[in-house]
Structure formats: C-alpha cells, structure tokens
Amino acid sequence: MINCANMTAVAVDPKERWATAEPGVLLGAVDRSTQPYGLATPAGVVSHTGAAGLTLGGGFGMLSRRYGLTCDNVRYFDIVLPSGEFKRVSAESDPDLFWALRGGGGNFGVVTKFSYQLHDVGTDFLSGVAMHPIKNARDVWNFYAEFAASAPNDLQVSCSGISMPGGKGFVNISIFYGGDPTEGEKIIEPLLKFGKPMRTDFGVKKYLKIQSQTDRNVPHGQQYYQKAGFVQEISSGLIDALVDVTKNPKPFTQTMNFTQVGGRINEVATNATAYANRNVEAQIVFGGGWPKPVDANEEWISMIRADWKTVYPHTDGFYTSNEMGDDSDYLKKVRANYGENYDRLVKVKNKVDPMNLFRLNANVKPTA
C-alpha cells in the first residue's frame, strides 16, 4: 500500500472555476472549499469518500445527471508512473493515458493531484425523502421505477430499501433537484402525492448539508459486505426478487439501494473515456452491515451472496469502485464490463505498466 492520507491540500480558483485536490483529500473537503463561491463539481454522496478512488473509477453524485461523471470534469492529472516518472496528463499532453485514467481505476500509477472543472451551481437545493413501510415495498419500487424513468436531468432520484432483523424496515425515495427549487416542487408533485409515507422531509437545504447527510449510514468501523450492479431498467422481475428478500429478514440489517444515473452521463459517447457504462439508468448496491465482527461473519456474508444471485441476472455491468470481486471469474467480468474500451486500456497498460505492478484492483492485465 502507498499511503497518501497526509496529502490533503485543496486549491480553488473561483474566477477560472477550477479546483485541485491531492490524493488524500476526502470529498467533504472539496465541497467545503468550493461552496463559499457557489461552485461545485459532481462527486459522491458521502463526504468521507476518498476523492481519488472515486474519480479514477468514474464517480457520480447528486449533480452528475446535470454535469456528468466526476472523471468527465477532470482537467488534468499529476501522476507518478510505475517507472517512477512524474507526469502531468491532460487531453493535450497524453490523450491515451488521460482517456484511460477517466474510469480505468488505479491501473496506471499513483495520481498525486486532480484538477477539476467547477460549475456555478449556487448553495441551496430542493432535497428530501419520503419514508414508506417495508410492507409496501412492491408499490414503492413500482412507483420509483416509473417516476425515475421520466425524470429530467436536473432531478436525481434514489430509492433505498432497509430490512432489519425481526422483519421491520422501510423504503425511502430521495430526491435532489439541481435547478430552481420552485420548478423542482412542480416536478416532484407526483412523489408528494404518492402513498401514505411514515415520514417526509422535503425542503430547500444547503448543498454541504445534503452532501453529508448520509454519512451516518456508513460510519467508519462498521462491518460491511456488498455487491453492486447497473440496471438499464427497474424491471418487474427485479422488483419481485427484492420483495422476496424483504420477506426473509436476516439477523443483520440488509440494504438494497438504487442510485439513479443516466442524464448527462449517458449523453457522453461510450468510447470518450475508459468508463464504459454509458447506457444504464441506475446502480443497485446490495449488501449488509453490522456494528462489529461476529462469529457468524462468513455465514451472514453467504446469506447476502445467496440473495444477490437472485438479483444479479437483472443487472448489466458494474461500477468498479463498488464491486471488488471475490470470485474466480472477476477478471473476466472486468473485461466484459469495459466492453469495447478494454483493448485500448490494455494498450495503455502495456505502455506504462507492462509488469502489472498496479494489479490489486479491477485489473487490466497487460499482454506485453
């Protein structure tokens, strides 16, 4: 491991609308540095996520349906290559490596600085959540599938199912509107009228608060196991599989989270960057968590894997930052996931890392 945790500098040029961040920077620090100017770059939904790993894998957040992936908004990378050479990589200086670093992960070296394009977005956004009882999960997921499918690029809609021990739980539909809040209130009116939620919390909130409001759901020190995949649609078959999971509660808290993508992300050509999943509409992150290590750790993980097998057939590719493989076919899945972009990634890998020094990742294996 190369530890970059002490490299935490962030710099902002509000006039030219760019920011730079070192590899130890967390997303919250980027937001806190750019929001005083009403600026932001699309990145993440948990403030203690590392900016480096998120960016290299692609990166999406609340603003991505409007402005694209995090990697779509990178101006240049400073990198130390496996040879030890330091290089500033941009579309002009090294178009092939610049292309590969935008979605190709940690395959090509240690990035020591990221330069991001910023957008004039303001500081206040319409945001909120409607919480429904888990017994109504099928109706909620059916509504979510239809509502999200018609969402404009300014609207990002997520849906989280939480199944707790004993059978209790809930399903949340969350929204973030990146445009005029008044216009957003009209667009989310069907959501406000849907069902009989246990709780609602809609209103205009500060971006910094929105960006950190889910931190408490993923605290440091918690035990986690998750699988993830993209979906082109939230089909009836997928909803059936998830409802069956809720009917079989586990001795731990189980989560089924949909994050809407699409929008501007899908308007970029598949081969424009290494990130290849430009044809999907949502990501599902499926897993479980418990506060501390337990003797039944492996047994509980096996339960999640078994449930995932019923969900997996409805997925189409995966986000490499959320799905580190633990099966023998993982590298085959990585190759298939990059699709038409994989051969170009191999050419870049052959050039900069022919000995595959950087291999403990969603690995692009060199042929040199």
Image (spheres, grey):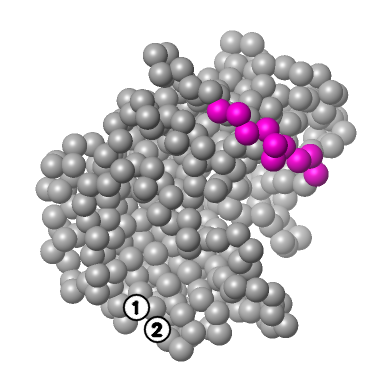
Secondary structure beneath label 1:
helix
The residue to which callout 1 is attached is: 134
User: Comparing marks 2 and 1, which lies closer to the viewer?
Assistant: 2
Quadrant in the rendering for residue 98: top right
The residue to which callout 2 is attached is: 168
| Label annotation for residue 62 | none
Quadrant in the rendering for residue 344: top right
- Residue at point 41%, 46% (across, down): 211
- Residue at point 58%, 53% (across, down): 322
Q: Position of residue 77 (x, y in %)?
A: 62, 23
Q: Position of residue 272 (x, y in %)?
A: 51, 26
From the viewer's perspective, is residue 143 above or below residue 42?
below
Classify residue 173 as left or right of residue 41. left
- Is residue 334 visible in this depiction of the protein? yes
Counting residues from the start of the chain, the first of labels 2 and 1 encountered is: 1
Question: Is label 2 in contact with label 1 (beta carbons under 8 Å)?
Answer: yes
The residues bearing labels 2 and 1 have C-alpha atoms spaced at a distance of 7 Å
Residue type marked 1: Ile
- Quarter holding the N terminus is top right
Highlighted magenta segment, given as a residue range: 1-10
- Is residue 364 visible in this depiction of the protein? no
- Residue at point 61%, 47% (across, down): 320
Classify residue 242 as left or right of residue 21. left
Q: Position of residue 2 (x, y in %)?
A: 79, 39
